[in-house]
Image: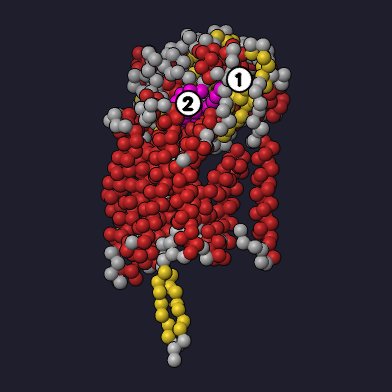
Amino acid sequence: MTCAKTGFIDRRTLIKTGLASAALTSSLSFTRRAHAADGMIRIGFVSPKTGPLAAFAESDEYILAGIAAAFKEGLTIDGSTYGVEVIVKDSQSNPNRAADVAAELILEDEVNLMVVSSTPETTNPVSDQCEINGVPCISTVAPWQPWFFTRGGEPETGFEYTYHFFWGLEDVISVFTEMWGQLATSKVVGGMFPNDGDGNAWGHPELGFPRPLAAQGYNLIDPGRYQNLSDDFSAQISAFKNDGADIVTGVMIPPDFTTFWTQSRQQGFTPKIASMGKAILFPVVVEQLGDAGHNLSSEVWWTPNHPFASSVTGQSAGQVATGYTEATGRQWTQPIGFAHALFEVAADALARSGDPTDYDKVRGALAETQLDTVVGRVDFSSGPVPNVSKTPLVGGQWRLGGDFKYDMVVTANGNASDVPTGGSMEAIS
Amino acid sequence: MSLSYTVQRSTRASQTSMSLTVVILIILIAAPWWAGRAELRLMVEIFYYLALAQMWSLLAGYGGLVSVGQQAFVGLGGYILFALAAFGGVHPIMALVLAGAITALIAMPTALVAFRLQGAYFAIGTWVIAEVFRLSFAQISALGGGSGMSLPASIVKSIASSRAGREHLVYWVALAIAVAAMALVFFLLRSRWGLAMTAIRDSEPASESLGVETYRTKFIVYVMAAGMTGLVGALIFLQKLRISPDAAFSVQDWTALVIFIVVIGGIGTIEGPILGTIIFFILREFASDWGSWYLILLGGIAVAVMLFAPKGLWGLITARYDVHLFPVGRRLIVNEEKSK
């Protein structure tokens, strides 16, 4: 940099130097860590902390604080005690960045185990990097089909290092049809499937919704894949209206669903049931609809009423959720349980590995996981394809009232009868 | 008093720096023996951003072609690599080279469309073209449609027999691409095309009236930059292992960040993108975990540089010290002689 000649440049130089040193010190305080000596286990965690998927990562800090407290004394493996360190990287909701930070965690931080959460756009690039680098990886919060098949998985062989627990499309189909069966409808269903990882899987003619719905006597109107962040759904709405659809379903991103639902009401399309995946997982999205969110239904992966408890802290699902509300003042969300369970599965596999610094031993222990977690049982030997374990899925409706503006009421539990229902389906008025 | 003139290309500083460049290059070629796996991977990333920045600087800084659609060619290169390697059975390194060539071919009809637009309209037009490519690839279900696809592990492993061999080979390919991108700019600018390009940048009608073949010059530069960008794109997605339309045709990753690098480094120089790339990676190493604040910081720096140093940080350096590491310009030396 040039020497300061005038007061003006002087000030600028000062500001620049100041910024640079501020950048230096604050990064030292929370991103860099001393390369730990032996006896330290490093877990890499990739999560979309910023960007459009940030709502999924909202509870990360609360979960990590709980995990840090639980492993304050370290993890005892085969007689030796190891410290546990979780290194968190932000994917910025960008699959390119997710691949990069995963490679950084593997090569630079030399993590012993990777965990990753939230949508195929985050889980898949991270799993791919782990598979090729031979690092064990646990992923969740993406239906297993888009995780398994779009990564080129073969049902006979599966993957070597990457494991996944969540539910699948067959579960969401059975939950949705169970909810629809509770009300008298025309059995005509409008389908809103975008051209993205989830939309293509849900709308897939063989593996997705079309075939099972036809088998159960539903007439699915599928106007075709639309691009995310569209601002006009009139064509779809008029197709649904003309065919007399009483039900709409799909897997929309939140801003698109808000647009679609507002336009539906403006254009006089009033289905009795709207069962939407992904869009209305978070109460904030439903609140944005004002009172028009009442009785919208969606898949429910986890609630505080799920009869499960953490294998690490012993807390019940309800205690984990209440703790979150107490810590942040915000309503519980479904990813909380899964973020916690990721670390349960990780700790369990590390503990059984014998040597947590050996990737293959950790992988071997991971493959043999049989663990009751706060989201249900995780068992990779019992999945529909290798490397996958399914967790129970129920369905529910958002209802006005209660402690927060909307409360989630479970209305269908055919897949998981141990999860209590809170009522039965009500038609949208 | 009579004056005599000599035209000089290189200065002593640039001669020194050329020999220094050779030394640095040898050190970089030897990197697999002195750097770890993480450093190698980081350097691959630095090399591909450097190559992208050189190409954008060539287009905008010399050719006056301000494109915000270079992600079109990054994405094309990446998708062609995946298609050739996964379905054509082509060796990934071979597929990389083919991807560059095919991208250049596709850039030809693209140029015919884009060149009907001028200035700001050209910029928007290139972006629209990139979006068209993104939406088109989202419709190709063999390549995963909107969901994208992963490069099968067996194909990645076929690059070389061992993991180290694979990583070293990819590193050398990346280094070769970065060097090739810089060599392309260097030799192009020293040729008559370079002179024609700078003339077009300064005034297209004036250069045309002086006999410069403006259309052909722009066309050739655009297609060459596209081919090189496609090659880089193939390398990028060979590293990422997974491609999807949003990732491949990301305006933020492959154009906005590249413009940032060129703007802070110094547009229209070879040294500027090098300096810009170094600064960008230093910032990213320190600040990328700050979430939104990191992006705000990048934006703030770009605005500050544009306001206070429109020629970038390298422009500040040359204004003060008159150094040119890569001699592409010509300078007129006036020798004053006393006559009797």
Q: Amino acid at mark 1?
A: Phe
Magenta range is A113-135
Q: Amino acid at mark 2?
A: Asn
* Marks 1 and 2 belong to one chain: yes
Q: Is residue B141 above or below residue A148?
A: below
Do we see residue A74 in this rendering? yes
User: Which residue is the extreme one toward the bottom?
Assistant: B340
Do we see residue A184 in this rendering? no
Residue on which disc 2 sits: A133
The answer for how far apart the CA atoms under marks 1 and 2 are is 21 Å
A50 left or right, relative to A188: right
B232 left or right, relative to B272: left
Q: Name the residue at 58% across, 30% down.
A: A109
Residue on which disc 1 sits: A343
Q: Name the residue at 46% across, 87% down.
A: B338
Q: Is residue A329 above or below residue A412?
A: below
